[in-house]
Image: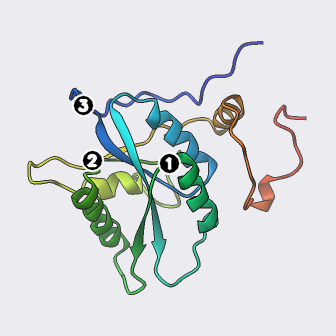
């Protein structure tokens, strides 16, 4: 039996500088961002220092429970920074960009890592990538998005999680996709 590929995607070159760039992982607590964190940790061009969570002000957070995300951050030894999207905002892109600018200024973050695998809905480009392009420092350098799972096969990523011996806890599942079929297709 041939070994399964490790969630294979085209490699991305983040930096040719001699020192790693400070990176933060866009964190939901789910499997994709966990696998993206692992890939970023293994990339010598990056120094992952933070997890970041974009969440709405005064509304329920629709990702994994915040308490689980905070426990994950503690276990990983990384601070979980919250970017609060104001409830009064009418321009979500502007709110995200302002949050990223704040992260760059306060924490020196140059790269945002995301576990995004594909476009969502009617988007024509990756959201975080588009937001990062609007964050420019005094030297004219853009914040970068690193998408190590982009266009990866989901089954390969699932097998990678198992091969890496991730401890998987289901905190929410989209019911049409959990039918009792095993990983081996049976």
Disc 3 on helix, strand or loop?
Answer: loop
In this rendering, the label closer to the viewer, 2 or 3: 3
Q: Can residue 134 be seen from the camera position used here?
A: no
Q: Which residue is mark 3?
A: 19
Residue 6: horizontal and vertical position, in percent? 60, 26
Name the residue rendered at 61%, 35% in the picture. 153
Residue closer to the observer: 54 or 78? 78
Quadrant for the N terminus, please: top right
In this rendering, the label closer to the viewer, 2 or 1: 1
Q: Is residue 72 left or right of residue 137?
A: right
Name the residue rendered at 45%, 28% in the picture. 10
N-terminal-most mark, 2 or 1: 1
Disc 2 on helix, strand or loop?
Answer: loop
Name the residue rendered at 17%, 54% in the picture. 136
- Give above or below for 181 relative to 10: below
Callout 3 environment at 10 Å: few (<14), some (14 to 19), or many (20+)? Answer: few
Q: Which residue is mark 2?
A: 110
N-terminal-most mark, 2 or 3: 3
- Give above or below for 57 relative to 103: below
Q: Can residue 30 be seen from the camera position used here?
A: yes
Dividing the picture into quadrants, the one containing residue 51 is bottom left
Label 2 to label 1, Cα distance in Å? 20 Å
Label 2 to label 3, Cα distance in Å? 12 Å
Residue 56: horizontal and vertical position, in percent? 47, 76
Quadrant for the C terminus, please: top right
Q: Which residue is mark 1?
A: 77
């Amino acid at each position: 039996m041939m070994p399964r590929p490790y969630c294979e995607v085209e490699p991305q070159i983040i930096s040719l500088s001699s020192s790693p760039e400070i990176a933060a992982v866009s964190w939901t607590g789910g499997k994709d961002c966990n696998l993206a964190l692992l890939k970023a940790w293994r990339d010598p061009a990056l120094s992952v220092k933070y997890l970041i969570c974009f969440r709405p002000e005064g509304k329920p957070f629709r990702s994994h429970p915040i308490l689980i995300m905070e426990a994950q951050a503690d276990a990983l030894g990384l601070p979980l920074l919250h970017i609060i999207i104001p409830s009064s905002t009418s321009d979500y892109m502007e709110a995200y960009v302002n949050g990223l600018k704040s992260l760059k200024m306060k924490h020196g973050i140059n790269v945002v890592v995301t576990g995004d695998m594909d476009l969502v809905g009617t988007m024509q480009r990756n959201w975080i990538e588009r937001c990062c392009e609007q964050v420019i420092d005094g030297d004219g350098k853009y914040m970068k998005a690193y998408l190590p799972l982009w266009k990866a096969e989901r089954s390969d990523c699932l097998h990678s999680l198992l091969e890496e011996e991730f401890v998987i806890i289901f905190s929410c599942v989209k019911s049409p996709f959990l039918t009792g079929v095993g990983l081996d297709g049976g």
